[in-house]
Each structure stands twice: as structure tokens, then as C-alpha cells.
Amino acid sequence: MNASAISVPHDHDHHGHGDDHGHHGHVTLQYQPGLPLSKGKLIMWLFLSTEIMFFAALLGSYVVLRFGAAVWPKPHHVHLSEPIGAFNTFVLICSSVTIVLALEAARANKASLAKTWMVLTLVLGTLFLGVKAYEYQAKFSHGIYPWSPRSRVFEKPDLYYGSAVRARLGEPAMIDRLKELDDTPEDKLTADEISGRRRLQQIRQMVTSPDQQPFDLAVVADQVMPLPAEGADAHGGHGPHGLNDTFPWLKLPAVIPGGTMWASTYFLLTGFHAIHVIVGLIVFAILLLYKLGPKRAGMIENAGLYWHFVDLVWIFLFPLLYLF
Amino acid sequence: MSRFSGILWSLLFLAVPVLGVATFAVAPSINVWLPPDVSEHGKAIDGLFYFILALTGVVFVATEVALFWFLWKYDAAKAQGPATYIHGSHTLEVVWTIIPAATLLFLAIYQMNTWADVKMRRPAMAPSVEVVGRQFEWRLRYPGRDGTLGTPDDLFLVNDLHVPVDEDFLVQLKSMDVLHSFFLPNLRIKQDAVPGMKIPVWFKATETGQFDIVCAELCGWGHYKMKGRVTVESREDFDRWLESQYAKQEATQPEIDPSATVARTE
Amino acid sequence: MSIASAPPTVRHEPTVQAPAPHHASFLSTYVFSKDHKVIGLQFLFSTLVWFLIGGLLALAVRWQIAWPWSDVPVLGKLFAQEGGQMAPEFYTMLFTMHATVMIFLVIIPILAGAFGNFLIPLMIGADDMAFPTLNMLSYWFMWPAFIAFGASFFVEGGAASSGWTSYPTLSTNIASSPGAGWGQTLWLLGLTFVGVSSMLGSVNYMTTIILMRAPGMTMFRLPMTIWAMFITAVLQAFALPVLTAAGFMQLADRTLGTGFFSPEGNIVNNWMQATGGGQPLLWQHLFWFYSHPAVYIMILPAMGMVSDILTTFARKPLFGYRPMVYSIAGIAGLGFIVWGHHMFMSGMNPALGITFMVSTMMIALPSAVKTFNWLGTIWGGRVQFTTAMLFSLAFVSMFIIGGLSGIFMAATPVDIFIHDTYFIVAHFHYVLFAGTAMGVFSGIYYWFPKMFGRTMNEFWGKVHFFLTFLFMNGTFFTMHILGAVGFPRRLADAYHYETFHHLQPLNAFMTWCAIGMVATQAIFAANFFWSMFFGPIAGRNPWRSNTLEWTTPSPPGHGNFDFQPVVHRGPYEYSVPGVEKDHLMQTDPPNAAAAALAAAH
Ligand code: HEA
Ligand code: HEA
Ligand code: CUA
Ligand SMILES: [Cu+2]
């Protein structure tokens, strides 16, 4: 087959317009070999490189904000639990293994086995999200929100903090609760609760007295949520019990230096990661509608690539957020 | 006809360097040019401006005239025979990479010293004044008699900056709300004021007179009117002015609550 | 393995199939079409409409600069404050939206979306993009952006007004200005959609160019347009996600109350940002990390198109093909490490400024190589002064001006004086309007026959060119000397500064030129629409050009090629000695003369 046999129309200047439309046939075009990759796989890699830049920007911002901040809370101040995080990391790594097994099975034309692995991947991914939701819930219950209106996190024991504490203590439901606590006979309370009640009463006095000084508010803050001394083991136990721990219903605003920015970045990073996890799960769910034979191997492979990427992002997030 | 149009179009492209150079040549004489410079470091900046103007001027004229000449000479309606069949020249590529590279590298190194003088070699002295940008005014705070900022005898002013001539002057630049930019055209000074940052700005004025302070960073609807004045005056005049302002402040505001101001500005 | 050197191993019989049954509806042919050509034209029409809007916004801007606080004709009635006089906050909205429209809805989508879509498959010999549906989506993702930007003028408080750079805390603190309310939020949403659209487009383009080239079309036989589109897509893919991330953070600052970009206790207009601890400069870094590469996204495709058009009408091979390719790549690579030159005065560490200054100086090098090679291409050529050629020549001529003014600003000490003055405005209008937009006009005149099967009127094209060229320089060249006085940008009324008092007549002159420039475009619009229906029929290859798109019918049918294209040579074989006609198309079979020539080389 030589090239001259191919009819190459050119210089058809005399061709009429209508002419051109008249007789064009449909040609299945051949292409110059480029990379040894399918279109789907190539675009997936390219898409993932845009994703890398996206997360690089978020992580970069995190690093800049964190190291530009005067103070940054230790994981324990903000109720981050390393074991839970580590467990979740493990879950995600397992899911990366199961998706590979699903691909293997599909390639080997074992469709039902592939489906089993795929279901397992879906379950593991959902488990990851469940744990994440539990962690978010723990933050919310301590008043740590990424945004201001509902957040009970304060940077300094300043006047704003004082008025927030006063407002909380002045809520009608709270007044009833406090009264109830005051009226409870001592023998119904633990030792911890008794001392807590005494401290709480002092605080109420302090906060409601008109000439409160910033210094006193620092004491209040320390009672609500004691921060371990500098240099104390950050990962260690809970130390002295704060009032919020003794009386969980109290939900007093807490002072966590750097806590607001910490919360913003934490929710930003893990939030966008979680969105990516959800997208992955949707893709898996869609794949489950098909027979996962060799014909679908390409799709499974691409979904797997994406899933590995999501996994990889978490491998960066976990140490940055939980360990350092 | 088509020969004629070739001439016309080439000349149009020749008009670019001709009118371009003419514009820059005429501009100073109609007073549309660098405003008078009254700072010490401004000489270096202006010198650099003229240097780059000359350098780019030469490149500009050379390339634009070459463009014109090629159009004139190689007009299809005029030139005989087919075009030169050539795919490039390795030597030429090397030459026209190396020469601009050397020029630009020279320029990069040549200017560093001026930059360091204006932005990096901060004079060892206490701030002469604190300038705080705020929508849409410049708040000034002189240290007062004790020479230290943040003490109860600070002098507060708005938009009216006074500077002693022939002395190093150190501004501590802050912003209360959004970005502003502290632009003194005649002193060849520009620095953004960033909320949350304290940025030092220094200069030495060499001539007395009154000049504009311009806000050069978009700061909201009133950006255009965020205008201040800087008065450069002799040391005696400056001290006298400071004294009179101080007296005025004490007369109008007999009691400033010192703790309140300190707390707010820290 | 090297893609570039892979030999054309596949030589196939053209497999002509029976024509596919045509039962496509109007909707699927012209609206939700997956055909890259239709999508390209959809982009073209949408962006031209926005071009007009952007131009009218520019006129309103110019009006205020020339005659501040005088009643605005036409527009004044629409946005009348009192009597028809423009309010200062409206002025800030005008230039913000002018720039936003021009950059995000005109220049970027017209280059990548319109020309990229239309030309990539045609010029590489593919029947369509690799992922037609994705391609269609990339167009339809523009619509939420069109709506968001368009609607923002009509919401409470008006459109975004913190400049196209959207610097915090002006943009994040909702009390900072009237437009910092809904307008700013819509602006961020619009930006996100533009971003998604560009991202979908760019990965698709890269895949198409890598995998769908005709047999024999090695990487180093690609036309410059395709190289430029390819590298632009790479820039998009790697720079844009950063802006998207930053946009989400700013959106969170505005709507959720986080404080990524607000320092502790930021009070604007007596309204305190509840959260803080963030850094206003972080936004600037993220923004320019995208937006500097973006300025090259806004010029590289034009450079590619101009290279192709110059060779066609100089009837001469491109001078220095490989250096041209390497310099595009060089611009793209260096483009990622120069963003800090927008921040010399921002309060960033001045030592960092020095490193950015050096890298910025170096980025002028590949541009120099390109400029000299364009001149080399014209040298010894046989120049045909068609309208397309004239616009391409204007591109070269004007890019030199815009590029050289960049050197002033790259010099940090000089930038102290000229930063945020009209010198900068002159610089970027020379590269963007006098540069890229001329390239775009050139591309429209050049590829119009391929798009619509008819050529545009040459006489009126030249009138359009001449007047645009004149008025454009009248408007923008003068800005250099305004900048030398220190005339600041973004000022609704600069004349109450003593320093700038005397510049009003000059500004009035520029405004008259701008009015003339916009009016001139009526000639273009008329020519464009008239020629679409009544222009002379073009045939396949009206310019006797070499690249693959000229082997297809005009306009090409569905599937583009009515034969299997096989590429035998590079795209610039004009005036080959010993060959009778003065050009050898990429598909022309190697004949005796060409073979002899190859042997001689
Ligand atoms: C298409 C768009 C485009 C292009 C191509 C460029 C190209 C360049 N730009 Fe420009 N720039 C913008 C768009 C663009 N810019 C925009 C939109 C802004 C403002 C944003 C805003 O604030 O709103 C801006 C702002 C801007 C600044 C910030 C100014 C400030 O705010 O203070 C700087 C500073 O360094 C700069 C530099 C340069 C340089 C060095 C080049 C170089 O790439 C130019 C290189 C080209 C040449 C130099 C000419 C050809 C070369 C020769 C003929 C060889 C010989 C030359 C020498 C030896 C000198 N630009
Ligand atoms: C690609 C970008 C681009 C383009 C093309 C333009 C085009 C123009 N620009 Fe602008 N401009 C910017 C990008 C651009 N600009 C940016 C980034 C800023 C900075 C904003 C900021 O500070 O935040 C700016 C700011 C800016 C200012 C400064 C405002 C200020 O700082 O106070 C001025 C003032 O003169 C101005 C003027 C003009 C003029 C007169 C045009 C003219 O050239 C416009 C000409 C328009 C036309 C000629 C329309 C043509 C229409 C068609 C061809 C359509 C035909 C229709 C059909 C076929 C359907 N622009
Ligand atoms: Cu302050 Cu602009
Ligand atoms: Cu830049």
C-alpha cells in the first residue's frame, strides 16, 4: 500500500459550496501512534494532574497560614484523635487494595468476584466517610465550626469572649439548668462535679460582676478548657478536667489560640477530600450497575486511578493535620 | 494599485516607531512627564527609567524599522522571483538569544542596588511617624515629645504629613481595613498598606514644598478621593509646626484616655 | 520513548463507510451539538457578543476618565444615580467587570474555546475531539458564568467592584464597598464555572493532540497554532486549579465567615470580621500564581495563529521552527515562577522581589526569540497584504511595544514609581488588545472561509484594520506618558490631585479615539454577518496554505475529512525550489521534486 494511492484532494478552488456538501463520505480515520495509553486513561491522568494542583494549592495555603500564625493549637486542644485518624487511614488504604483486586478479577473475567471487591470498596469508602462524620460531629459538639456564627471558639480571653460566656450563662434554659445544679444535694454528685460546681459558681460571679478585668477572663477560660502548659506532652491525656468536660450540657465558649484558623483549614482540607471520596463512591455505585467483566476493565482501572489519588491526598492530610 | 497599497501599508508600520518616538520626545515639553523628584533615591530610579527607556527605545526602533523595511522590500507586488527558501539559522538563533540574555542579566544586576536602598536597607532609627490607611483617609501619628510611638503624648493628624528636609524619615505603614497604597509621586515612593502588617518605608526629601499623597491601591468607592498632602520643610519649620499641632491637640482634646488608644492600636 | 520521532508506521486504506443516517434534530445539530466545529462557533459567537459588551463597558470607563461626573450618554439612563451622572462605586464596578468580561469571557474563551475547538481536530487530522460530550459540556459550563457575571449588575449593591484582581480584604469584607455584597459572590461563582469549563477543555485538547494526529503528523510537524494550543492547555491544567482553590477559600471567607484572607480583628467601615488570623497576601500569591500564567494563556494561541498566518502570506517557511516551539515551552515554564512581579509593592519580602525580578527579566528571552523569528520569516518573503496578514503584522508590531514596556515594570525600582499607574494599563492593553485581539481578528479573517465557506470582504476588512490600528494607538500609546506622570489607575476622578490636574485634555483625546475604535467595529460586524451569507464562495484552500484544515471542504462536514489524511512534511513548505506551485501541502504526496529536495538536505 503506498501513499500515492490515497486520493488527496487539494486545490479544489473551483469546487462549489453545495458540491462539498453533496458527496462527503464518512471516513474512519487512522491516527499516528502517540503514547501507549488509551484516551480514557490519558485524560484521567491529565485530570488527576489538575487535581494535584488543586490540592497542592489547598495544602500550600494550609502550610502558609499555619506557619504564619502566631499560635497553632495542638491536636488535643481541638479534640483530634490520632487513633481515629490512623484507623481511617488504614480503612482507605484497604479500599485501595480492594479496588485493585476488583480490577484483577474483572480482567480475569470473574465478574461476580469483581463485584464483591467493588462492593467491599464501596463499603470501606462509606466507612471512611462515617468515621469522618463522627469526627465532624465531635468537633461540632465542642463548638468548633469552620465559621463564626455558631463557633464557640475564641482566640483570646478578651471582652468578646467575656460577653459570649455571659450570654451563654444568661440563656433561659441555662439559668434553669444552673439552678437545678445549685439545688442538687452534694451526695448526688461525684467529687469532680462538686468541685466543678464550686468553680462554676465563682465564674458566674466573675462574669456577671460589672468590673471584670481581662485577667479574670483568662481564669474563666482556663476553667472552661484548661490548656496544658507549653512543653507538656501534646498527645498525652486530658489533664485536668475542664468545666465543659464535667458538665457536657454546659457548652461554654472556649479559648483555643489559633483555633478558628485551625478549624477553617481543617474543614477546608478534609471537606474537599470528603467531596472527592463521595464522587468516588458515586462512580463505584454506577459501576456496580454493570457486569464487571473484561469489557469494563478500562473503566474500573480509571476509577481505581482516581481512588488511589484520593487515597494519596489523605496520606498527606493525615500527618499534616493529626501528627505535626 | 496593489503596488501602491504595499507602499501604504509599509509606511503605516513605519509610522509606529516614528510617532512612538515623537510622543516620548514631545511629552516632557508639554509637561506630561515624570513629576519633579525631590528625594534622594529618586535620582537612581529616574536614572534607571531613562536607561531602560533608551535601551528599549533602541530595540523598539530597530525591530519596528526592520519590520517596515522587510514589508517594503519583500512586497509580493514588487519583489522579483520566489521567496527565499530557508528554515532558519542556527547561528542567528544563538546570537539573538545570547545578546538579549546578556543585556537583561546586566539590567537585572545593575538595578539591584537601588532596590535594596529603597526597600531593604532600612535606616537604624525609630519610626518618625505612623501612617495608617483607612477608608478613605490617611491617619498619621507622630511620636510626640518623647520620640516614641504608642505613648500618651502621641500627636494625631489626618492627611497632613510633614517631613523635615534632608533627613532620613521612617514611616511605619499600617492599614486598618483594606489594602491601600502610600504613593508619593514626587518622592518616588510607593508601598501598599496591608491590614495586619507593619511595613517600614523610608526616604530622604531633598527639597521643600507641598506635594500629593496618592492612594494607589483600590480601596473601595472612595479610592479616588483618598488624598493627602505632604509638606517638606526645614527642620525649624518642622519643629515649629509639630509644636503648634501639639498645642492644638491639647487644646481641643484635653483628655485622651491613654489606655483606650493603646488598646485599640496594638 | 519519544513521541516526536515516532515514524508514521500506520498507512491505511481509506475506509469509506456508508453515510450515517441523518436524523439529527435542530437542537442536537446547532445547540447541544457535540461537533467540535459547532462548539467552536458557539464559543465564537458568545465571545463576540461579550466582546461588544466589554467594549461598551470600556467606553463608559473612558467617559468618566475624560469628563468625570458629567452625564453619561445612553448608559447613564440605565444606571442613573442622579440625573445620569456616574456614581464613584459604579465606576469601580465598570472597570472590574470590563476586565472580567474581557479576560474571562472574551480573550480566554475565544482563543481556547473558539479557535482551539475549531482548529485542533482539523489541523491535526482528527474527525473530532477525543471526548465530544466533554467538549460540549465545556461550552455549556460557560453559561452559568455568563449568567452570574451578567446578573451581577442587577443585584442589590451592584456588580463586583474590587478590581479583576479581587484583593482581600476589600473583596472579603462585605462591609467594605457596595459591590462587595452579592456582586462579589456572583463574581466568584462565575469564575469557578469559567474554571471548570477551561479545565474540561484543556484536558480534552491535550488528549486529542497527543492521541489523534493523522498518520505522519509527528509532534515536530505540528503547525505552531497547535503547539501553542497544546502548551496553553498545559498551562491551563496546571495553573487554573490553584485559582479555583483560592476562589473557594474566598467564597468561604465571604459566605461562611472563615478568615483565610483576613487578619485578626479586621474592621472595615465599623464592621468587624469575626474571624481572622489569615493573610491578605496569600490571596495575591494564589491569584497571580494563576493569573500570570493566564496572561500567557491569553497570548500564546494568538502567537501560534500569527505564526501560521505570517508564513502563509509571506510565502515562506517559518524561520526557526524548533526555536519557536522551545520558546513557547520556555515562556510556559518560566511563566510559573514570575508571578511575584505583580507584588513588588505588596509588602512581600523585598528579597523575594529580587528573585521574581530576575525570573521576569529572563522570560523576555523566549519572547525575544519569537519576535526575531517572526521578523526572520518576513525577511526574504513575498508579502501579500491581505487583511489577515495586516492584523498579524500589527500583532508583531504591537507585541513589541507591550513587551518592552514590561521591561520597565520588571525593573523593581522603576516599578516603585509606575506600579498601579497608566503605564501598566498601557502595557497590558498593548499585549492584550493591540496584541492578542489583533491576532484574533487576523484569525477570524483567515479561517472565516473554513468556518462558513465564504471569504470576508477584503476592502472593508482593510478599512476595519486601518481605523482600528489608528484609534488603538491613539488610545493606548498615550497611556505610557500618562503613566510617566504617575497617573494612577482605577481612579474615578484623578484631577483633584494637583500632580495630575493638567492631564484631562489628553484623556479626552484618548476617549475620542476609544469611541472611534468601538464604532469602527460596526464595520467588522457588518462585514462578518454579510459575508457569512453573501461573501464569495471560498473553496477548500483559498489562501493556498499548507496545513491539513485546508484539505477539507469549506465548511467541513461531520467527521471533517472525506479522505484519510497522511502527512508527509512539516506545515511550512512554501516556495520550495523545484516545485511548480509555490506551496507543498502537508498531505501532498512526496513527488520527484520534493524527493530531490529531501536528498539535497
Ligand atoms: C497577554 C498578556 C501579557 C503578556 C504577554 C505580558 C508580558 C510581560 N509582562 Fe505583563 N501584564 C499583563 C499582561 C501581560 N504581560 C497584565 C494583564 C498585567 C496587569 C495586571 C493587573 O495588575 O491588572 C501585567 C502586569 C505586569 C507587571 C506588573 C506591573 C505592576 O503591576 O506593577 C509586570 C512586572 O514585571 C509585567 C511584566 C511583563 C513582562 C516582562 C512580560 C514579557 O513577557 C514581555 C516580553 C517581550 C518583550 C520584551 C518584547 C520582545 C522582545 C524583544 C524585541 C527582544 C529584545 C528585548 C530586550 C533586550 C529588552 N507585566
Ligand atoms: C483582554 C483584555 C482587555 C481588552 C480587550 C480591553 C479593551 C479596552 N480597555 Fe481595558 N482593561 C483590561 C483588559 C482589557 N481591556 C484589564 C484587565 C483592566 C484592568 C481592570 C482593573 O483595574 O481591575 C482594564 C482596564 C481598563 C482601563 C483602566 C480603568 C482604570 O484603571 O480606571 C481603561 C481605561 O481607559 C480601559 C480601556 C479599554 C479600552 C478603551 C478598550 C478597547 O480596546 C475596547 C475595544 C472594544 C471593542 C473594539 C469591541 C469590539 C467588538 C467586537 C469586535 C464585536 C463585534 C461583534 C460581533 C461580530 C457580534 N481598560
Ligand atoms: Cu485607599 Cu485607595
Ligand atoms: Cu505577570
Image (cartoon, rainbow, N blue to C red):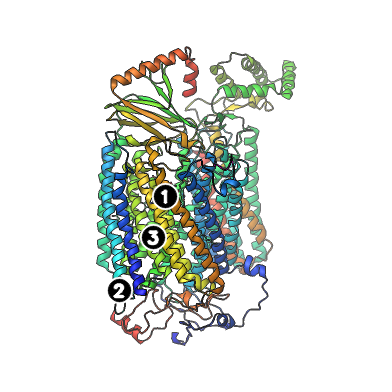
Report the label total. 3
| Residue C218 at x, y percent in the picture | 42, 72
Quick one: quadrant of the N terminus of chain C? bottom left
Give the dominant element type of the magenta stretch: helix, strand or loop: loop
Viewer-side residue, C304 vs C392 = C392
- Mark 1 and mark 3 in contact (Cβ < 8 Å)? no
Question: Which residue in the structure is indicated by mark 1?
Answer: C509
The image position of residue C481, as x and y in percent, is 35, 47
Distance from Cα at disc 2 to Cα at disc 3:
23 Å
- Residue situated in front as seen by the camera: C75 or B217: C75
**Badge 1: residue crowd in 10 Å (few <14, some 14–19, many ≥20):** some
**The disc label shown at residue C329, or none:** 3
Q: Earlier in the sequence, mark 3 or mark 1?
A: 3
Q: CA distance from mark 2 to mark 1?
A: 45 Å
Q: Is residue A39 magenta?
A: no
* Residue C82 is covered by the magenta coloring: yes
Would you say residue A69 is visible in this rendering?
Answer: yes
Task: Give the residue at x 66% y 52%.
Answer: A123
User: Residue at left 55%, top 70%?
Assistant: C530
Region rendered in magenta: C80-85
Left or right, C486 with respect to C38, comes to left
The chain carrying label 2 is B
| Residue closer to the observer: C266 or B167 | B167
Circle 3 crowding by C-alpha within 10 Å: few under 14, some 14–19, many from 20: many
Amino acid type at image mark 2: Ile
Front tag of 3 and 1:
1
Q: Chain of mark 3?
A: C
Judge the density around disc 2: few (<14), some (14-19), many (≥20) Cα neighbours within 10 Å. some
- Please name the residue shown 40% across and 54% down the image: C474
Q: Read off the residue under disc 2.
A: B86
